[in-house]
Structures are given as C-alpha cells and as structure tokens.
Image (tube, rainbow, N blue to C red):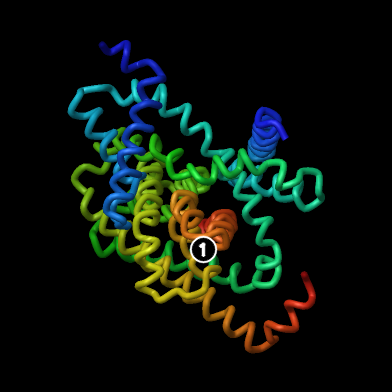
Amino acid sequence: MKMMFQIGILFLVCLAGHAVSSLLPFPVPGTVIAMIFLFLLLLFKLVKADHMKPLSDFLLKNMAFFFVPAGVNILANLDLVKDKVFALIAVVVLTTVLTFGATALTVQGVIKLQDRLFGSKKKDGEKV
Amino acid sequence: MNEIFASPYFGVFLSILTYEIGVWIQKRTRSAAANPLLISVVLCILTLVLGRIPLDSYKNGGDIISAFLGPATAVLAISIFSRLDLLKKYFFPIFLGTVVGSLVSVASVYFLCKAFGLDDVLTKSMLPKSVTTPFAMAISENIGGLPAVTVAAVVLTGILGNVLAPLLIRLFRVKNPIAAGVAIGTSSHAVGTSKAIEIGETEGAMSGIAIAMSGIVTVVISIFL
C-alpha cells in the first residue's frame, strides 16, 4: 500500500484516539486509545499488518529519536527542581531499577508456575 | 542570527545530527552507556546553553518531531498483534507483572522521596513517573503534584530505562523475553520500549502492552492516594 495512504490511516486512528480521549471522564491518553483502535482494526481484519509494514517499520525503528525533543525540554523545568536535582535523580534511578526487577521476576515466576500447572504443550495446541 | 535558529529546520536538523552522532558513537564503542537518545539530548542541551539559543527556538523544530510520538506509539499495536498468541497464553502473568510493578513503582517513589526529605508536592509529582507522559500528567494534576516536574521525571525515567534495560536484564538474570519486555514497559514506558524493540520483537511487543496496562493500573492506584 502507498506510504501516503498508510500515513493517512495511522493519523486518522490517532485523531480518533484523541477525540475519544477528550470525551472520557477518566485520564487515558489518546495515544493509548489509538493503539487499542489499531489493534481492533487488525483483529477484525479491517487493516492488514503487511499493508502498514513500511510505515510501522520506519516509526518503530526510529522510535527513540522521536523522544529527543521531550528530553531537551527538561531544560524548561530545570529551575523548578534546581536544588533538589540530585535527590530526584537518585529517586528516579533507584525506583526504575526496583520496578524493573519486581516486574521481571513476577512475570518470569508466574509464567513458570503457569507452565508447570497447566503444561505448556497442551495449551500450545489450542491456538496455532 | 536568532531568526535562523527560530526556523523549524534548525531544531529538526540539530536533533538528527546529534542523534546520528550518538548512533555513530554507539557503533564505535558497542556499549549500552553510549545511548543515542541520551547523547542526542545532552548534545542538544549543550548546544542551546552554550550557544545561548532560546529553548523556544529549538521547539519550533522539536514539536515537528514530537508530533510523530503518538503515531509511533500507536503503531506498537502491530507488534503486539504479531505476538497475539503469547498475549493470549500469558495474559495473566503479564497483567500480574504490570500490577506488581506499578505498585512497587508508586510505593518505592513514595518511601524514597520521604527518605531523601523531598516535600509533599515534589513527592506527588514523582509518584506517576513510570507511566507514559499523558497518563502521568493527568495523575499528577489529580493528586496535587506539579505536572511540569512530573514530565521531567517521566522523561528522565524513560531515558534511564532505555540506557539501563540491557544491563538490568543481565543483573536480574531475566531469561524470558516476555518478562524482559513487560519489565521494560512497566518501569520506563514508551521511551524504554524503543530500546525493547531493538532488543527483540517479543520484547518490543510485550513492552508495548505494558505501556497501556501499567498506565491504566497506575490511574486506578492513584484513586486511592
């Protein structure tokens, strides 16, 4: 599918996500709703993943780059936290490591438990 | 001269140039610490500060790049869809992992802020720091934090997750790619996810799921704060 058409579909999905987000009474970002919409479009075969591939490959491969301006923008808020900067960085570092560890070990542990209890072979046969 | 810097081409060019320098350094050193995103952000900030270029001038171009963040995150749906079988089979461990991770994140931020003697407003601004910016800003506002501080903490967390992810996988001996992906997404949202994509397809997809799940779980947690 033509690149322009893929961009059109993706931006339309994002627009719909933002529209729904602004109507919801609780905070769910438009981007997350757009992600769910695109997932549903794929699930109901209204959009084929292969058709979006050139665009999605480009965006996903360069995703880190798109965060550069957000990082530079820290400069704007630096004076708000100037004298607390080291404490804040320490909190960010420690909590990120703790969160990573707790999540990884939980998922890994529960997957092992689930595979042992229900047997991974049998479940594999269900959905191929 | 300032008119040149105020052109949107300046911000876009500076970002691409510094990012490519980062990619080059990473290829040369093959080290996780030589992270293109981190290098680019530091070089951009140095350029602006040393060149006395107003941040607003840079933002004229920066905003164009940021406009791609939404679509780049939404497109994660395609990676998630390609791992639908794993998501179905391991939905419970993935969901439980994001719940435990989000609880640990909020609780550890709270206690560490207290330990470092940070005041109430700063603590509240830091609580949602592990979830993606729009989630975090809304939560921060609701519980009485400063959204501007929250955004800085969120971005810092993301960049840190992006830099540390390969190291943390080794440190915690994470063998399972699903566990690694969910942990990256839960601890460092979309910025970390961009590293998860580089590590592997399964890691990227699981990290993408974790962005949405941990965000929603943290919103629910924030109701009780």
Q: From the viewer's perspective, is residue A4 above or below residue A114?
A: above
Quadrant housing the N terminus of chain B: top left
Q: Is residue A109 left or right of residue A44?
A: left
Q: Residue at x 54, y 74 (%)?
A: A107
Q: From the viewer's perspective, is residue B20 above or below residue B104?
A: above
Q: Is residue A90 left or right of residue A66?
A: left
Q: Residue B52, position in %: x, y?
A: 20, 23
Q: Residue at x 31, y 50 (%)?
A: B26
Q: Is residue B136 left or right of residue B119?
A: right
Q: Is residue A102 visible?
A: yes
SS for dot 1? helix
Mark 1 highlights which residue? B181
Q: Residue at x 31, y 26 (%)?
A: B55
Q: From the viewer's perspective, is residue A86 above or below residue A54?
A: below
Q: Residue A39, position in %: x, y?
A: 70, 50
The residue most toward the front is B28
Q: Nearer the viewer, residue A39 or A1?
A: A1
